[in-house]
Image: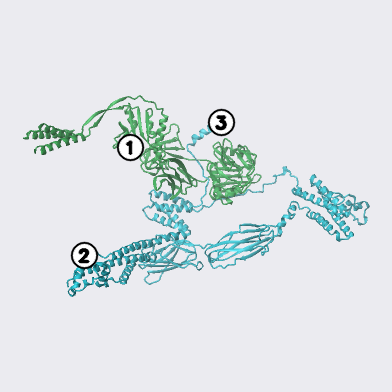
Chain colours: A green, B cyan
Amino acid sequence: MEFKYIVLILSMLLMVFMLYKEINKTKKARLFWRILASILAVSCFALLVIPIKYNSSLKQNANEITLITEGTHPDTLARVSGTKYALDSSGSKSNKLIFIPDLSYFLATHKDVRKVNIYGNGLPDEELENLIGYELNFHPSEIPTGIISANWQAEIKTTEQLTVQGIYQNRSKKNVKLLLKGLGTSIDSISVDGKSNKSFSFKTRPKQTGKAIYQLISFQGQDTLAKEPVPFAVGEQTPMKILILASFPDFEYKFLKKWLYDNQYSLAFRSQISKNKYSSDFLNMDKLNLNQINGSSLRKFDVLIIDEEELAAITPVERAAIDNAVNTGLGLFIRISNSKPLTPLSGRFGRVESPAAKDKQLNLAIKNEQYKFSKLPLEQTLYLKPSQNDQALVADASGKILVNSTIKGSGKILISSLSTTFNWLLAGKINDYTTYWSDILSKAARKKIEVQTLKIVPQFASVNKQARFIVDLSTPGKIPTLKIEETKLAPRQNIELPFEWDATFWPTRAGWNNLSINQSNESFFIYEKEDWLALKNQQTLNSTLNFLDKSNNKEAKTTTTAIIVQENLSPWWFFMGFLIASAYLWFESRIMDRK
Amino acid sequence: MLKTEGQNWIHSLRMKWITLHLVLAFVISLAIALVLSAVAVTLLHLPLLISAVIFAVVLVTALFAYPIWKTKDRDFCRYANNKYPELEESADLFLQNPAELSMLQQLQLSRIEHRIAQIGGPKEPLKRLYVGFAILLAGILMSFAITKIPQVQKVYQSNASKHEALPVIKENIPAEISDFSATIIPPAYTGQPERRQKQFSIKAETGAKINWTIETNIAIKKLKIIFNDKESISLKPINNERTSWFFSKNIEKSGFYQLDLDGKKSDLYQLEAVADLPVTIKITQPKQHTTIDIGQPQRITLKAALTDDYGINDAFISATLASGKGEGVSFTEQKLSFNTRFNNQKNIALSKQIDLKSLGMKPGDELYFFIKAMDNHGQSSRSDVYFVSIVDTTELMSMAGMTNGVNLVPEYFRSQRQIIIDTEKLLKEQSTLSAAIFKTRSNDLGIDQKLLRLRYGQFLGEENETEIGGDHDDHDEHTEGKSEQEKFGDVTAIMDKYAHKHDIAEDATFFEPEMKAQLKAVLTEMWNSELRLRTYKPQEALPYEYKALRLLKDLQQKSRAYVAKTTVKTATLKPEKRLSGELDKITQPVQQMSAAQKDLRTGNLKIALALLESRKSGKRFAEVDRFLLSDTEKYMIGAAADNPATYLNALASLRRLSGSKTLQIKDVDVVQQAIQKMIKGESARPQIKTALPASALYQNYFNNLNRAGR
């Protein structure tokens, strides 16, 4: 304000001085014009320094605000008139956006707002919650190019496969090559045609033990479009314990025994040699009395492999013990060779006999995994009937099932009519043999209950954005201590699920971080802000659109009122005036006077 | 003496001429020198300085070939007279002393002196200069093209044979070494000349001798050469200053080595042994299985192409002839040589005509053969086995196939055949034979026919004819009794006496009724035939004989399904006694084993992979990690000793990684790739799946649902 007055006073003085000079001039010709020009020049000069503001009335909805979010195109921004708000402070200054630090607070303080126009990618879920009940008008920006959805296992076990799946959305006209790279080698790639979406699924068996960051790299020609990190961990775990009860020893058992023994699995093998006389092997484990099978001995094992003859031959008490153990989680694998079921447990599966194929070769494949085994030289006549409660695991080329499974209680029962798989080993197809038995034993084995699990929300938690941990604990009731690098978090218990706790935090460091939950450590990965950008944008777009769909968007009553907007008069006008006036004065004094 | 205008003109003409000529000489010799030095530098690998020498030589030669400066003004006068008619053959006047000129000469001189102003300079040297510049341009182009020749050649050579030379690897050579060379002396059999290289990475034939000569710029106390990080050999200096060193070694196996100069170790250098491959044999003709049908020439043309990397010493065909059938197969082995000389060629195309007859091959025989070749290192290799067989035509006509099913009575069939043949023979010879002989022979045939009939009768259980040749008259023997032959106490004899012994009934029961009927029909035909033969009408007997044969054949076809009767009698089982033995003495065997902890190699390598991954994100190696890294290095040294080409780079990168503080992502990548190659053939293992915690709640749900379901 002071500055304004100083300028005014100074210009008044200047004007007085100039007028005095003009009037005191000997020549009185065009005095009026000169006085006028002097007044104009000084006043224009003054106004050039002091900006002039005027109030203009703008017809705008008082109950409506315009919210600009990330991804709004500058052209769109220019077209939108009226007051614009933004939740992001970074671009608000240059684009004349009014920054809203907190949307819920803003809405609470502006009770008259009923309608929100949203431009750009939209708002994330947690912000959208604030807008329930408001009329929304969403102008989405263009959908992004890049990976718009992706998923993989955060943790796998040794020798398990890592599957990276997702969708690539290509909006450009040119092809994009997508490459999965890890541990210094390129693993797999696909090419996405221009203007198309393509889903991808890369499978690999990572060789490391521990954490690794693979990369999904998208190329267009020689240009790298994006490099997205794919962090995961490979963990070792204690091998499962297996019990085999055989009515007679055969080669199938012999090879299976050897393979498991070599891989340090604990294995107990019992085969009958005469009535109530058994031969038993204990591999990688302590001796055990196996003459009588009971609940306590079964509890020590994760899988029981038995042939149907043996299952029929054991005493009813033992059978009941097995039945009970399966109900409480034991995996049971029954080998059958007869078309008629001998026990009720194995009779849960239907059997069918069909003539052997002409070439006498069995083409097997794991269902749901597209893994094809090499041929087995077998004349297989016994197959299993699919039924509603079963899940087929292994079938031949024509879809006839050889290994079937069902659940019983919290355990699993698997049944197989395949008698000799060791032929794979003899033919040198070690990979087929190990894949078959790994798949089957993994499916059957008793599940190990974890002590705690950690989930992080959102999927791609990035630096300096709020993230939330969800921790499941096996021991309910006690408040867990959550710590990130000596920073203690305050967990909140889920009202409905007492074992679930969550805590919010703001990650500061990208990469692998550790969360200590009651002294034990869990690793999680924090992404950079630029990682998976296309995916995040697409997610906000989707969630905003979903939110719009869900909220039955009622027309809120809006009134248009003229609101007064203060605007600056362009200083150019005054400059022009100043220029003209001073030009006249100069011209007059130099040329007209000379005449 | 003041020069006249004319003199000046002539002089300037000469100067101009000489200048232009010198420029021309310079340009042309530059062009020639360019081409020559391009050849010398790029093709003959001479130093660049040679081009200056070449240029000087060429220039001097060019100048002295045409010494322009020796020309005199007089020569130019002559030239001017020839060239410019305006001078009216009077240019000589310019050169003469004007004072000595006659009146007329002076007049003429003054006439032409006015004209010389109008005469322009000579055009000829200028033209030649243009030509000279054209030559220079051509020279520049040519020399440029010549410099490109090695590159083109390289591309061509690398296309032709990629293994020829070691790819030039940039090597870090210790600063102490001023000069070095490795001489590779390949083993004699390869026929390769010895070569010298100025590179420590060596690729040589297996068994090659390598001589290293190393010159150092300072005296080294101890120079060692370390092979595969294990074998360390101290070198002996050649000279007293201890700056010149020599070492020699035969290489049998790939690996790597490094130099140790007073404890300062150099980089690792690759040592690759290229093994001599055995001869590859490709037989283009005949096919693997060849059958020679009747009418085709009984010979085969064998064509084969043999290749070896150093030379083929010998090759021959090993042929085995299999003749005969069933158990009577005999094999004869023969060695056939190619009638060519082997002069250690690398490639040879062989062809040979094999006459199967001369090998002693008959229809039905098979010939197995393969080519065996030796290379000049004494390694032998052999081709696949090829088969040639000649179709046996008699096999098709024979009856062997018919007898295969049941080999019950083969000779009888032949007999029926024989009877037919004999009958036909008898009829043919009828005219030459006397009636009595004819009749006896016909009767004999009738007897034969009877015998045959009796044999077949056996199968039908026909009575009274158990004994061939026995007559029905003998039937009465037991009624009359021959007591003198009776043996006392012989029960069977007494039994025989009172029993009417027919043939064994059991034998007659194993034919189906249908078959029996047909057999009967055969017997009827035989009867009819016998009747005609006995009544000396062989001509009439013939149709019956044929019919009998035909029926027999049919019968044989039918009897193929026949399975001979077995007489196994087993004792009946007593189920109540089964598995009721005393078992208390039987012990129950119990075995207990624990798999020895496998070597930690794979596990350590896997952890090392993750460690390197964490290093990638900028994390420093901890002290514990160093142990793991040194283990990894140990494994990698082992791998590199076998496959230096694959693992040597990685080993160097690994050493850099563990040594230096600055991180090179590329090094990590290289090491990770190598480690992944080292963890080979890892197969799937069963893994326990995990369930979420909070089992108590889920267990409650489960129990309640179970109860509700009941």
**Mark 3 to mark 1 CA distance (whole Å):** 63 Å
The secondary structure type at the circle numbered 1 is: helix
Q: Chain of mark 2?
A: B
Disc 1 marks a residue whose amino acid type is Pro
The secondary structure type at the circle numbered 3 is: helix
Residue A162 locus on image (x, y percent):
47, 45
For label 2, count other residues whose C-alpha is less than 10 Å away and answer few (under 14), some (14-19) or many (20+). few
A317 or B424, which lies in front?
B424
Q: Position of B307 compared to B411: left or right?
A: left
Q: Residue furthest left?
A: A26
Q: Residue furthest front?
A: B104
Q: Quadrant of the C terminus of chain B?
A: top right
B485 or B574, which lies in front?
B485
According to the picture, the residue beneath numbered tag 3 turns out to be: B709
Q: Quadrant of the N terminus of chain B?
A: bottom left
Q: Would you place residue A338 above or below residue B183 in this image? A: above
Q: Would you place residue B492 above or below residue A503 in this image? A: below
